[in-house]
Amino acid sequence: MICAGCAEAPSIFACKQCGREDHPYSFSQCARCWLTERLDGILTDPSTGTINTELLPLYDTLRAGRQPRTTIRWLIKPGSVAADVLHQFATGELALHHDTFRHQLPQGRRYDYLRTLLTSTGILPPAPIGIERLLPWLAELLAQQPSHHAEIINRYAHSHLLRRLRLHAEAGTMTASMTNHARASILLATRLADWSTRQGTTLTDLTQAELEQYLHEQPGAHHTASGFITWLDNSGTTTGLLLRKPAKTEPAVTMSDDHRWDSVDRLLHDHAINHYSRVAGLLMLLFSWPLNEILRMTHDHIAEQPDGRVLVTFDSIPIEMPPGLSRLILDQKASHGLTPYTAGDTNWLFPGRNPGTHMVTERIRNELVSHGIHPRQSRSAALFALASQIPAPVLAEIAGITPAAAIRWAALAARDWSRYIADR
């Protein structure tokens, strides 16, 4: 099938403005021309009659998006705040600054998205939005605690949890799951504080016997509250508290290799599953790479060779992909459109909904589980299979695990690679 222009025939779909037939939208305009006119109205500074110079990078990014219809829907859908807020920035009614989002505009995902969009286009400098949202929540939570407990939990949050988050924010590796984990850790700390209050004691005076009683009464608390309990002792808040480490569990496999290959076959051929989930799931099932690390991959990890082969570098070793997966990876690399503005310059292999971010793990994990593919079990099965085929040092580099863990997997697979170096 060819377009009317190539067939030298008149087209009823051609845009009356630019003459193109792709992205038809209204009777006389294509979606891209309609979007351009809309953006002209939103981002024009009335004092100059031209696009606000500060917002030019955003204007160019939105116009260049691969799916202009998606951007139009984002601007005009009911409840959207984008057009109004951007117009106020363009006219100078609102200052183009992070403080405007912090103090003048309502809090919520729609405004956070707009803020990350302005950040990703270089209009605003990077800002740790997740940390900013956590601080007022923390203050409200601590207001419900006795002062002596609030002071301890506040120190734990700022010196331990928030410090780590800020380091990740500076490195550009902070994710929503990290901030969610910080919130959960703070809530677990308040539960221990509440329990100690009911026992007529405090976190400072907590004894080993009382800690053991708490862990006995709260199934699962040994694992979930271990971070706070360890911090209490390390920070000198308490003395003599010992948290017994659970016995180290050996690697275990609960998925058969046949089941694993059935999952591989499903992801290769089932087009009902989202394309990005198929690619991420296959990289996990075939090469045992952790799902969260897969989602941090960029285009730089992918190298297409002149002969058509596709190499993927997980850690430091480029690995040739099988043909079916190679095609899926190249399609994923070429595809965009996961964000409303569909910017074409993202370097993430799995771009997220928010501009400048990669996809969150939960999004793909939930879809894989809905199709009977459980990431933890699948990765264990892949590690087991690889451990029986390659030496432990190579497994450690490919799978992103420690050499000691690779040796344990090799032992489980009953392969002795002690003569590997000599054989080489």
Image (cartoon, grey):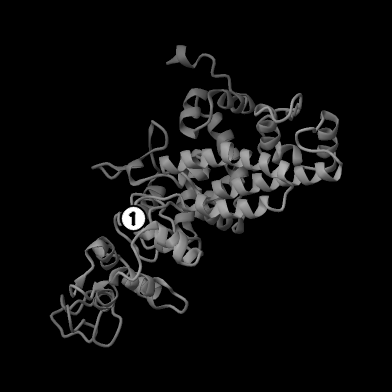
**Residue 213 to residue 333: above or below:** above
Q: Is residue 360 visible?
A: no
Give the percent coordinates (x, y) of residue 325: 41, 48
Task: Locate residue 252 relative to residue 355 in the image: left or right.
Answer: right
Amino acid tagged 1: Leu
Q: Is residue 162 above or below residue 120?
A: above
Residue at 81% in and 38% down: 215
Q: Is residue 14 left or right of residue 135?
A: left
Q: Nearer the viewer, residue 348 or 126?
A: 126
Q: Quadrant of the C terminus?
A: top left
- The residue drawn where x is 38% and y is 53% is 356
Foreground of the two, 93 or 117? 93
Name the residue furthest front: 147
- Determine the image quadrant of residue 221: top right
The foreground one among 400 and 282 is 400
Vertical side of 149 occupied by 21: above or below: below
- Residue 34 percent coordinates (x, y): 27, 79
Crowding around mark 1 (Cα neighbors within 10 Å: few <14, some 14 to 19, many 20+) is some
Q: Residue at x 20, y 76 (%)?
A: 20
Q: Is residue 139 visible?
A: yes
Residue 170 image offset from top left, x and y in percent: 42, 41
Q: Quadrant of residue 244?
A: top right
The residue lying furthest to the top in this view is 422
Look at mark 1 in the image and give the residue it sits on: 124
User: Residue 5 location in percent, x, y?
Assistant: 16, 78
Q: Quadrant of the N terminus?
A: bottom left
Q: Secondary structure at mark 1?
A: loop
